[in-house]
Amino acid sequence: MKIDWTRNETLVALVILGFCAAAAMSDPGFLSLATLTDLLRGGIVLGIFAVAALIVLISGGIDVSFTAVAAFTMYVTAMILNAALPWLPWWAALAFGMAVGAALGAFNGVLIAFFGLPTLIVTLGTMSIFRGTMLTFIGQKQITTLPPGMRDFGRMMLLRGENSDGSFYSLHGAFAVTVLVVVLTWAILHRTMLGRQIFAIGGSEESARRIGINVSRVQFFVYIYVGALAGLAGIIHASMARVANPFDLVGLELSVIAAVVLGGARLAGGHGTLTGTILGVALIVLVRNSLIVLGIPSTWQSVTIGCLILLGTGLPAWQAKRAAARAA
């Protein structure tokens, strides 16, 4: 099988292997089941966010409000379920959160799809609106007593055990939800006409409109879908943390966009893969969890992620420039 060394996925996979090798040499315990399950757990919420960001980038837009949607959803859902619907089972709690997130995403969708406003400006504005509304009018205190449905979900485990050295490992049930989100999004993008329309709009909105695609309707769906995924990620985050903290998830946008861009998604739209996004998430999770293992202060996280963004966006641009120069 021929390996395409120019693809972002290949380069990111090589960086991951190099990172793991360096971490294993620094700490032989790095290559253990406990470490693997910790890394998978760290990628659950980040992975759902990244899938949401990917579908927006493919459509030619950008969304920076998804963390605010997630925080708003987890806080409001916990309050409503505690006050009025404590009998809801865990799956209904997740569905409730997705509905709240979809409603917030629809607000973005209306402004972008039907009023034609720039996606970055809209989502920057709604990010402040969602977060400010929650902190000003709803509450700022942590909800430490979650509703029964969210508590039940927080206790679900796919895998749990003890290593020979006495250390424990576990894989949360939410990992299965992340896998379902990836499979569903792959099916939408690659097995439906809607997915082809999303790629077409990202490639050229005007061309898509000329061949008969209802651009507004597709964009509206994209932002509702992203809102639903963000709401789901918020409920999962609160359930796993056993607390709904309105100040959680702030600033995670940079890591999410870094993961998606590293995976090969283009900021100009029309291109991106779930494989690359998953690899990008894996690299970001490794960076966030392994700098200390390598003896690098955690304060270097932002510097490292910023360098990875420059590398992930700069290298394809440099390769495209070289290809254009050779073709000329």
Image (tube, grey):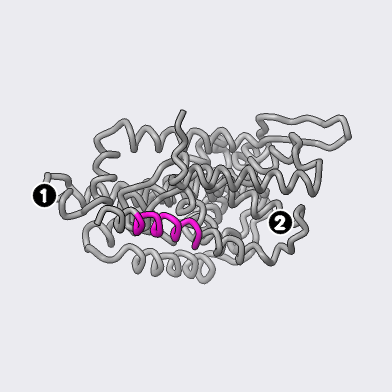
Image quadrant containing the C terminus: bottom left
- Which mark identifies residue 291? 2
Q: Quadrant of residue 197?
A: top left
Q: Is residue 14 visible?
A: yes
Label 2 sits on a secondary structure element that is loop
Few, some or many C-alpha atoms within 10 Å of disc 1 (few <14, some 14-19, many ≥20)? Answer: few
- Residue at screen point 36% across, 52% down: 56
Disc sitting over residue 210 in the figure = 1
Residue 65 appears in view: no
Q: Amino acid at mark 2?
A: Leu
**Chief secondary structure of the magenta portion:** helix
Choose the circle earlier in sequence order: 1 or 2.
Answer: 1
| Residue range (magenta) | 310-322
Up-down relation of residue 305 to residue 175 (above or below): below
The residue lying at 34 percent from left, 59 percent from top is 321
Circle 1 or circle 2, nearest the eye: 2
Q: Where 313 falls versus 91 (above or below)?
A: below
User: Camera-side residue: 276 or 213?
Assistant: 276
Q: Whole-percent x and y of residue 152?
A: 64, 37
Relative placement, left or right, of 287 versus 9 is right
Image spot of residue 124 (x, y percent): 41, 68
Pick the front one: 297 or 162: 297
Q: Secondary structure at mark 1?
A: helix
